[in-house]
Image (tube, rainbow, N blue to C red):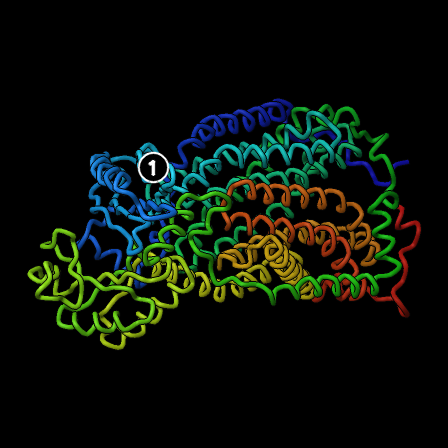
Amino acid sequence: MSNRASLPTAKPRVPQWLRILLPIVLILGWLAAAGVGGPTFGRLSSVVSNDQTSFLPSSAESTLVQQELGEFVGDDEIPAIVIVAADGRLGEGSLEALAELQADILGLDGVVEASPLVPSDDGQAAQIVALLDSSGASGEVPDLVAELRALVADAPLGDDVEAKVTGPAGFTADIGDAFAGIDGILLLVALAAVLVILVIVYRSPLLPLLVLFTSVAALCLAILVVFELAKAGVLTLSGQTQGILFILVVGAATDYGLLYTARFREALGQTRSRWQATVAALKGSFEPIIASGGTVIAGLLCLLLSDLVSNLQLGPVAAIGIATSILAGLTLLPALLLAFGRVAFWPVAPTPERPRTKPDDKGVWGAVSSLVDRRARTVWIVTALVLGAGAIGVTQLRAEGVPSSEFVVGESEARDGQELLSAHFPGGSGTPTQVLAPEARLDEVADALAGVDGVESVAAVSEESPSGTVPLPVDPASPFGAFAPTVVDGRVLLQATLAAAPDSNEAQETVREVRENVHAISPEVLVGGATATAIDTNDASQRDRALIIPIVLFVIGIILMLLLRSIVAAALLLATTVLSYYTALGVGALILQALGIPDMDPSVPLFAFVFLVALGVDYNIFLMTRVREEVALRGHRAGVLRGLRVTGGVITSAGVVLAATFAALGVIPVLFLLQLAIIVALGVLIDTTLVRSLLVPALALEIGPKTWWPSQLAREPRRSGELQREPEAVRAGA
């Protein structure tokens, strides 16, 4: 005898022809969407920008300077620094070859200007600064840098001479190379990981392919929408946002597919009608999928309040991905399973005579629910202590930013070149700090700049000077004494060369002091450049983190209260998910320190919070909506334990899938994505194995029916004495 009642077998009201036509139309519609969106994968990189300046708010000081640079120097030019160094002094042959190299560089298409050869004081190195056209008219910057590097590599500089191309253009090229595999290797690794997990979960050759096809179709539609919006200028897309979109859609769509498939399999065990099973599965999964997906979307859209454009744009881009995942999970997958029916589950297809291979109270989840039933108080206390111990690692978190030279994990010619440059020249050579000042305050501002420890030299931009600048203070006896600084709208542009590398902490401290000194002279003075951009980016990220995290908590809390119709249950889920987040962040910080990566991008904790809290609540929604359903039928205690047993396998499988997809971000050699991959994958596993499986159900038993306050379910009388055991007959599913 089945342990659950069969579904009604009355003749469905929907005509036979519509039951046949509807899945066909849905499947063909999604095939068309995938056919149009699929080819867009290769074109998405054409609308991607990794320029840090473009992600700053328009009010940022470095952004204001960048907007004015075009009046003084080319605003579509980005410097590439060719640094050449030898173990001893550079020989005459090397110097002659370098002079020829400078002429060859100037002849490259896309090179606007190339400085004369500048030897170092120790005679062991020399540099050439080449300004590249970044407008795209002569090709993309990474392609121009690749040509420049090939030219440098072929130059006969001598066997003992090392040559590198660095500077902002060099780092841009290295970042572009790091993101080059995002359209191919990232997606392949993620899909392969998901496929392996699905085969293990379902033990079926066909069903994993149907679920995976649903995820890919959702991604194709999301890519198509995002591409068109980015092409129209509505969205600004970065490489890291692109990678997160891929992973999020594959993971979320697969999770929704797992939830629907579990309901469909359960329904097939109660009826022989595929249509009735589809209707029952949609009724059982529609609310949790919509609620969990809506929660994630709401959390992501809170990023629209960000100052930093890269954070702000991730919100709608990722929200589009979640929306297409929901749409595919509730239309395409049901249509596919309706079409294939029990064949999709071959070789073990559920039937009313064989709805499941073992009763609810057997197996892993039967043992887990029995443990929670017998030792609820011990379980939640021990689990909370373990999570709290992991959260202590947050004290070791250093999320104030990382040098741009560390942005690429692994080999980076630009990073190696910067080290060579800093060894023989001031670290800021070729990448000066830009200072816009009123002409009337030129001398005061120049003196203030020169007086800052860490500023090696100061010059003013001059269109009259052959070198483009005039050293300050002006020496009338020098060859530059006759050249006046360029004045635009009563302002001049000063360039301060720093002693430290422009992406170092020392350079940031110097620029902060520069800003303090020059702002004391006049609030009209603006300080920009690469270092100032990094400062403004980090500051904006930290402001975003402080603002958005409380808002996300508030929004998700309201959604949970409305969904569960309970203040206590919503507070319970939110508190346990936040604890899980801090545990993941703490343990992740310790892991990264062990890997020799102590510093973290300031956006990582914010992104990790949005994903872990929204997705962590996702799994709790899957659990608690089913628990609420069971509580209404069986009472609080039996309902909690029954909900835990029947959702345990599917939710844990969904968590493993999502963790695997986020872990795939680690194959892209970008520090931000590596850090995010470690923390989010770890957090998802913690949430599904400890929080949702042990902490939440144990606390629900400890609190009792009051978990559902103020809804009507809270009025179930609680039995006196210690926590009562679940009756054997109820635990067996009767």
x and y percent of residue 417 in the render? 38, 47
Residue 341 image point, x, y percent: 70, 26
Q: Is residue 694 above or below residue 339?
A: below
Query: As rendered, which of 145 and 537 lies closer to the eye?
Result: 145
As drawn, 384 above or below 222: below
- Residue at (49% x, 59% y) in the render: 602
Residue 275 vertical position relative to residue 310 in the rendered view, above or below: above
Left or right side of 223 for 445: left
Task: Please name the residue that numbered disc 1 is placed on.
Answer: 158
Q: Residue 56 or 321: which is nearer the viewer?
A: 56
Residue 578, how many percent across, how many down?
A: 63, 62
Query: Looking at this rendering, what residue extends furthest in the left direction?
Result: 482
Q: Quadrant of residue 160?
A: top left
* Quarter placement of the N terminus: top right
Give the quarter of the image for residue 473.
bottom left
Residue located 52% across and 59% down the image? 599
